[in-house]
Image: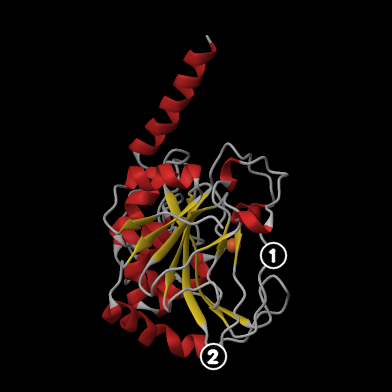
Protein backbone atom coordinates (compact mmCIF):
# COMPACT_ATOMS: atom_id res chain seq x y z
CA UNK A 1 0.00 0.00 0.00
CA UNK A 2 1.45 3.44 -0.89
CA UNK A 3 2.08 5.91 1.91
CA UNK A 4 2.06 9.70 2.05
CA UNK A 5 5.07 11.86 2.86
CA UNK A 6 5.01 13.56 6.27
CA UNK A 7 6.58 16.99 6.78
CA UNK A 8 6.86 19.35 9.76
CA UNK A 9 4.56 22.39 9.82
CA UNK A 10 7.49 24.69 9.01
CA UNK A 11 8.53 22.80 5.87
CA UNK A 12 9.53 25.11 2.99
CA UNK A 13 6.58 26.05 0.76
CA UNK A 14 8.54 25.15 -2.39
CA UNK A 15 9.03 21.63 -1.04
CA UNK A 16 5.30 21.32 -0.34
CA UNK A 17 4.48 22.56 -3.86
CA UNK A 18 6.93 20.09 -5.44
CA UNK A 19 5.38 17.15 -3.55
CA UNK A 20 1.89 18.31 -4.52
CA UNK A 21 3.03 18.30 -8.16
CA UNK A 22 4.48 14.79 -8.01
CA UNK A 23 2.44 12.96 -5.36
CA UNK A 24 -0.64 15.19 -5.11
CA UNK A 25 -0.78 15.02 -1.31
CA UNK A 26 1.25 15.14 1.90
CA UNK A 27 0.72 15.48 5.62
CA UNK A 28 1.91 18.35 7.80
CA UNK A 29 2.30 16.82 11.25
CA UNK A 30 1.18 18.38 14.53
CA UNK A 31 0.28 21.84 13.24
CA UNK A 32 -2.13 22.24 16.16
CA UNK A 33 -1.57 20.92 19.68
CA UNK A 34 -4.32 19.34 21.78
CA UNK A 35 -5.40 22.72 23.18
CA UNK A 36 -5.64 24.15 19.65
CA UNK A 37 -7.82 21.26 18.51
CA UNK A 38 -10.02 21.61 21.59
CA UNK A 39 -10.47 25.34 20.94
CA UNK A 40 -11.70 24.68 17.42
CA UNK A 41 -13.96 21.82 18.52
CA UNK A 42 -15.60 23.99 21.18
CA UNK A 43 -16.72 26.42 18.48
CA UNK A 44 -17.77 24.00 15.76
CA UNK A 45 -19.26 21.07 17.68
CA UNK A 46 -22.69 22.69 18.27
CA UNK A 47 -23.01 23.27 14.52
CA UNK A 48 -21.85 19.71 13.71
CA UNK A 49 -24.41 18.22 16.10
CA UNK A 50 -27.20 20.19 14.44
CA UNK A 51 -26.20 19.17 10.88
CA UNK A 52 -28.26 16.45 9.13
CA UNK A 53 -26.42 13.74 7.14
CA UNK A 54 -25.95 13.79 3.37
CA UNK A 55 -28.76 13.04 0.95
CA UNK A 56 -26.87 10.97 -1.63
CA UNK A 57 -24.16 8.34 -1.85
CA UNK A 58 -21.42 10.81 -2.76
CA UNK A 59 -22.08 13.17 0.16
CA UNK A 60 -22.64 10.12 2.40
CA UNK A 61 -25.80 9.06 4.22
CA UNK A 62 -23.82 8.79 7.49
CA UNK A 63 -21.66 11.85 6.90
CA UNK A 64 -22.40 15.43 7.91
CA UNK A 65 -21.00 18.50 6.16
CA UNK A 66 -21.09 21.82 8.00
CA UNK A 67 -20.05 25.08 6.33
CA UNK A 68 -19.84 28.87 6.76
CA UNK A 69 -16.89 28.33 9.07
CA UNK A 70 -15.41 31.80 8.58
CA UNK A 71 -18.64 33.45 9.73
CA UNK A 72 -19.28 30.96 12.51
CA UNK A 73 -15.89 30.25 14.05
CA UNK A 74 -13.06 32.66 14.94
CA UNK A 75 -10.79 29.63 15.55
CA UNK A 76 -11.45 28.40 12.01
CA UNK A 77 -10.44 31.83 10.67
CA UNK A 78 -6.99 31.14 12.10
CA UNK A 79 -6.89 27.83 10.23
CA UNK A 80 -7.89 29.54 6.96
CA UNK A 81 -5.07 32.06 7.38
CA UNK A 82 -2.46 29.70 8.85
CA UNK A 83 0.94 30.96 7.60
CA UNK A 84 2.12 27.49 6.51
CA UNK A 85 -0.95 26.99 4.33
CA UNK A 86 -0.87 30.51 2.92
CA UNK A 87 2.80 30.08 1.99
CA UNK A 88 1.95 26.79 0.27
CA UNK A 89 -0.91 28.47 -1.63
CA UNK A 90 1.44 31.27 -2.73
CA UNK A 91 3.93 28.73 -4.07
CA UNK A 92 1.40 26.36 -5.62
CA UNK A 93 -1.48 28.49 -6.90
CA UNK A 94 0.12 31.76 -7.97
CA UNK A 95 1.65 29.97 -10.93
CA UNK A 96 -1.78 30.26 -12.57
CA UNK A 97 -3.37 33.36 -11.05
CA UNK A 98 -2.61 36.78 -9.63
CA UNK A 99 -4.79 36.16 -6.59
CA UNK A 100 -6.39 33.04 -5.12
CA UNK A 101 -9.50 32.80 -2.97
CA UNK A 102 -11.13 30.60 -0.38
CA UNK A 103 -13.00 27.83 -2.20
CA UNK A 104 -14.89 26.15 0.62
CA UNK A 105 -14.95 25.59 4.38
CA UNK A 106 -16.60 22.42 5.62
CA UNK A 107 -16.44 20.22 8.69
CA UNK A 108 -16.73 16.63 7.46
CA UNK A 109 -17.87 14.19 10.11
CA UNK A 110 -17.76 10.59 8.89
CA UNK A 111 -20.00 8.57 11.18
CA UNK A 112 -19.80 4.88 12.13
CA UNK A 113 -20.92 2.64 9.29
CA UNK A 114 -20.25 5.18 6.52
CA UNK A 115 -18.92 3.25 3.45
CA UNK A 116 -16.05 4.51 1.30
CA UNK A 117 -16.79 7.54 -0.84
CA UNK A 118 -16.27 7.03 -4.60
CA UNK A 119 -12.75 8.02 -5.72
CA UNK A 120 -12.64 11.38 -7.52
CA UNK A 121 -10.61 14.47 -8.29
CA UNK A 122 -11.89 17.67 -6.60
CA UNK A 123 -11.20 19.68 -9.79
CA UNK A 124 -14.35 18.06 -11.23
CA UNK A 125 -16.29 20.72 -9.29
CA UNK A 126 -15.70 22.83 -12.42
CA UNK A 127 -17.28 20.18 -14.62
CA UNK A 128 -14.11 18.76 -16.15
CA UNK A 129 -13.59 21.81 -18.36
CA UNK A 130 -10.20 22.85 -16.95
CA UNK A 131 -7.25 21.26 -18.80
CA UNK A 132 -4.96 19.11 -16.65
CA UNK A 133 -2.09 21.51 -17.44
CA UNK A 134 -3.71 24.02 -15.06
CA UNK A 135 -3.87 23.14 -11.36
CA UNK A 136 -6.94 24.93 -10.00
CA UNK A 137 -6.79 24.38 -6.25
CA UNK A 138 -5.01 23.55 -3.00
CA UNK A 139 -6.94 21.67 -0.32
CA UNK A 140 -6.47 20.98 3.35
CA UNK A 141 -8.15 18.65 5.80
CA UNK A 142 -7.39 19.52 9.42
CA UNK A 143 -7.73 16.39 11.56
CA UNK A 144 -9.95 17.08 14.57
CA UNK A 145 -9.75 13.43 15.63
CA UNK A 146 -7.02 10.94 14.88
CA UNK A 147 -7.38 9.67 11.31
CA UNK A 148 -6.88 5.90 10.92
CA UNK A 149 -7.59 3.50 8.11
CA UNK A 150 -10.27 1.97 10.36
CA UNK A 151 -12.15 5.20 11.12
CA UNK A 152 -12.28 6.70 7.63
CA UNK A 153 -8.91 8.34 6.99
CA UNK A 154 -9.00 9.97 3.56
CA UNK A 155 -8.13 7.58 0.73
CA UNK A 156 -5.40 9.04 -1.50
CA UNK A 157 -3.71 7.78 -4.67
CA UNK A 158 -0.16 9.23 -4.60
CA UNK A 159 1.18 10.13 -8.03
CA UNK A 160 -2.25 10.32 -9.68
CA UNK A 161 -1.95 14.04 -10.64
CA UNK A 162 0.56 12.98 -13.30
CA UNK A 163 -1.67 10.23 -14.69
CA UNK A 164 -3.71 10.43 -17.85
CA UNK A 165 -7.16 11.71 -16.94
CA UNK A 166 -8.79 8.50 -18.12
CA UNK A 167 -6.75 6.19 -15.85
CA UNK A 168 -8.53 4.94 -12.73
CA UNK A 169 -6.89 3.60 -9.59
CA UNK A 170 -6.58 -0.05 -8.55
CA UNK A 171 -7.13 -0.97 -4.90
CA UNK A 172 -3.40 -1.54 -4.29
CA UNK A 173 -2.64 2.03 -5.46
CA UNK A 174 -4.82 3.60 -2.74
CA UNK A 175 -3.15 4.84 0.45
CA UNK A 176 -4.67 6.35 3.59
CA UNK A 177 -4.02 9.76 5.16
CA UNK A 178 -3.42 8.40 8.64
CA UNK A 179 -2.50 11.21 11.01
CA UNK A 180 -2.92 12.50 14.54
CA UNK A 181 -5.51 15.09 15.54
CA UNK A 182 -3.97 18.51 14.84
CA UNK A 183 -2.17 17.35 11.70
CA UNK A 184 -3.18 18.51 8.22
CA UNK A 185 -3.62 16.62 4.95
CA UNK A 186 -2.65 18.94 2.09
CA UNK A 187 -3.72 17.81 -1.39
CA UNK A 188 -4.22 19.19 -4.86
CA UNK A 189 -7.34 19.37 -6.98
CA UNK A 190 -5.82 16.80 -9.32
CA UNK A 191 -5.07 13.92 -6.95
CA UNK A 192 -7.48 10.98 -6.89
CA UNK A 193 -8.90 10.61 -3.38
CA UNK A 194 -12.08 10.03 -1.36
CA UNK A 195 -13.37 9.77 2.15
CA UNK A 196 -12.63 6.44 3.82
CA UNK A 197 -14.94 3.85 5.34
CA UNK A 198 -15.62 4.25 9.06
CA UNK A 199 -15.56 0.76 10.60
CA UNK A 200 -15.33 2.04 14.18
CA UNK A 201 -18.05 3.17 16.58
CA UNK A 202 -16.79 6.76 16.83
CA UNK A 203 -16.95 9.77 14.51
CA UNK A 204 -14.00 10.81 12.35
CA UNK A 205 -13.97 14.61 12.17
CA UNK A 206 -11.92 16.74 9.76
CA UNK A 207 -12.14 20.34 8.58
CA UNK A 208 -11.88 20.74 4.83
CA UNK A 209 -10.57 24.20 3.93
CA UNK A 210 -9.73 24.70 0.27
CA UNK A 211 -8.42 27.49 -1.95
CA UNK A 212 -8.75 28.05 -5.71
CA UNK A 213 -7.50 30.29 -8.49
CA UNK A 214 -9.05 33.74 -8.18
CA UNK A 215 -10.59 33.57 -11.65
CA UNK A 216 -12.70 30.50 -10.85
CA UNK A 217 -16.10 30.34 -9.19
CA UNK A 218 -15.93 29.24 -5.55
CA UNK A 219 -17.65 26.00 -4.54
CA UNK A 220 -19.03 27.54 -1.32
CA UNK A 221 -20.51 30.93 -2.12
CA UNK A 222 -18.49 32.99 0.32
CA UNK A 223 -20.50 36.20 -0.23
CA UNK A 224 -23.61 34.40 1.06
CA UNK A 225 -21.90 32.23 3.72
CA UNK A 226 -20.10 35.31 5.02
CA UNK A 227 -22.09 38.39 3.97
CA UNK A 228 -20.72 41.94 4.20
CA UNK A 229 -22.18 42.60 7.66
CA UNK A 230 -19.92 39.87 9.09
CA UNK A 231 -17.05 40.22 6.63
CA UNK A 232 -16.53 43.87 7.55
CA UNK A 233 -15.46 42.78 11.06
CA UNK A 234 -12.68 40.48 9.77
CA UNK A 235 -8.97 40.76 9.08
CA UNK A 236 -8.31 42.37 5.65
CA UNK A 237 -6.36 39.28 4.53
CA UNK A 238 -9.37 37.13 5.30
CA UNK A 239 -11.73 39.57 3.58
CA UNK A 240 -9.63 39.28 0.43
CA UNK A 241 -9.56 35.48 0.66
CA UNK A 242 -13.36 35.42 0.86
CA UNK A 243 -13.48 37.42 -2.35
CA UNK A 244 -13.97 40.94 -1.02
CA UNK A 245 -11.13 42.16 -3.23
CA UNK A 246 -10.49 42.26 -6.95
CA UNK A 247 -9.45 38.87 -8.36
CA UNK A 248 -7.73 40.49 -11.33
CA UNK A 249 -7.78 43.91 -12.98
CA UNK A 250 -11.42 43.53 -14.07
CA UNK A 251 -12.59 40.57 -11.98
CA UNK A 252 -15.09 41.15 -9.22
CA UNK A 253 -16.04 44.83 -9.45
CA UNK A 254 -19.58 45.96 -8.82
CA UNK A 255 -21.81 48.99 -9.18
CA UNK A 256 -23.69 49.94 -6.00
CA UNK A 257 -27.37 49.94 -7.07
CA UNK A 258 -28.13 53.48 -5.97
CA UNK A 259 -30.27 56.24 -7.52
CA UNK A 260 -28.58 58.33 -10.25
CA UNK A 261 -25.53 60.18 -9.00
CA UNK A 262 -25.78 58.98 -5.40
CA UNK A 263 -22.79 56.68 -5.39
CA UNK A 264 -19.72 55.54 -7.28
CA UNK A 265 -20.25 53.60 -10.49
CA UNK A 266 -17.41 51.05 -10.50
CA UNK A 267 -15.85 49.87 -7.24
CA UNK A 268 -13.97 46.94 -5.74
CA UNK A 269 -16.06 44.66 -3.49
CA UNK A 270 -14.15 46.11 -0.52
CA UNK A 271 -16.47 49.10 -0.88
CA UNK A 272 -19.32 46.89 0.41
CA UNK A 273 -17.38 46.49 3.67
CA UNK A 274 -17.30 50.23 4.26
CA UNK A 275 -13.76 50.62 2.96
CA UNK A 276 -12.83 53.95 1.44
CA UNK A 277 -11.54 52.50 -1.82
CA UNK A 278 -10.90 54.40 -5.01
CA UNK A 279 -13.33 54.15 -7.89
CA UNK A 280 -12.58 52.12 -11.00
CA UNK A 281 -11.31 48.63 -11.70
CA UNK A 282 -8.39 46.88 -10.01
CA UNK A 283 -5.12 48.32 -8.85
CA UNK A 284 -2.25 49.22 -11.16
CA UNK A 285 -0.28 46.08 -10.26
CA UNK A 286 -3.14 43.87 -11.46
CA UNK A 287 -3.36 45.71 -14.79
CA UNK A 288 0.42 45.55 -15.21
CA UNK A 289 0.42 41.81 -14.48
CA UNK A 290 -1.97 41.12 -17.35
CA UNK A 291 -0.21 43.52 -19.70
CA UNK A 292 3.14 41.86 -18.98
CA UNK A 293 1.71 38.40 -19.64
CA UNK A 294 0.27 39.51 -22.98
CA UNK A 295 3.61 41.08 -23.91
CA UNK A 296 5.46 37.84 -23.13
CA UNK A 297 3.05 35.84 -25.30
CA UNK A 298 3.42 38.27 -28.19
CA UNK A 299 7.21 38.15 -27.91
CA UNK A 300 7.20 34.35 -27.80
CA UNK A 301 5.07 34.25 -30.95
CA UNK A 302 7.48 36.43 -32.93
FE1 LIG B 1 -13.01 15.30 -2.56
Q: In which quarter of the image is ligand 1?
A: bottom right
Judge left or right: residue 194 versus residue 93.
right
Q: Nearer the viewer, residue 247 or 156?
A: 156
- Image disc number at residue 50: 2
Judge left or right: residue 119 versus residue 106.
right
Q: Residue 221 in the image: x percent, y percent?
A: 55, 65
Q: Residue 118 in the image: x percent, y percent?
A: 69, 65
Q: Earlier in the sequence, mark 1 or mark 2?
A: 2
Q: How many labels does the image show?
A: 2
Q: Which of 80 and 112 is in front in this view?
A: 112
Residue at 67%, 59% in the rendered image? 171
Find numbered disc 2 in the image and state the secondary structure of the residue it sits on.
loop
Q: Quadrant of residue 242?
A: bottom left
- Circle 1 residue: 118
State how far apart marks 1 and 2 are (Cα).
Answer: 26 Å
Disc nearest the viewer among 1 and 2 = 1
Does any atom of ligand 1 lie closer than 8 Å to the CB of label 2? no
Q: Residue 106 in the image: x percent, y percent?
A: 51, 72
Residue at 48%, 86% in the rendered image? 47
Q: Which of 55 and 161 is in front in this view?
A: 161
Q: Is residue 279 at least partly visible in the picture?
A: no
Q: Quadrant of residue 60?
A: bottom right
Amino acid sequence: MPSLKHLPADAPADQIAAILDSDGALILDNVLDAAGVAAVRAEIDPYIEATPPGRDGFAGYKTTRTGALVARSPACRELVMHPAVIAACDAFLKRACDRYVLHLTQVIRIGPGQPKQPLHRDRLAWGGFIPMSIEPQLNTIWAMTDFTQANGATQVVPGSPTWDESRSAHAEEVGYAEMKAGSVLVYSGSVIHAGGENQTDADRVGINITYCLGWLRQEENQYLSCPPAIARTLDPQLQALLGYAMGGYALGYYSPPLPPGEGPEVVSPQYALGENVGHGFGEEDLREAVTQRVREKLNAAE
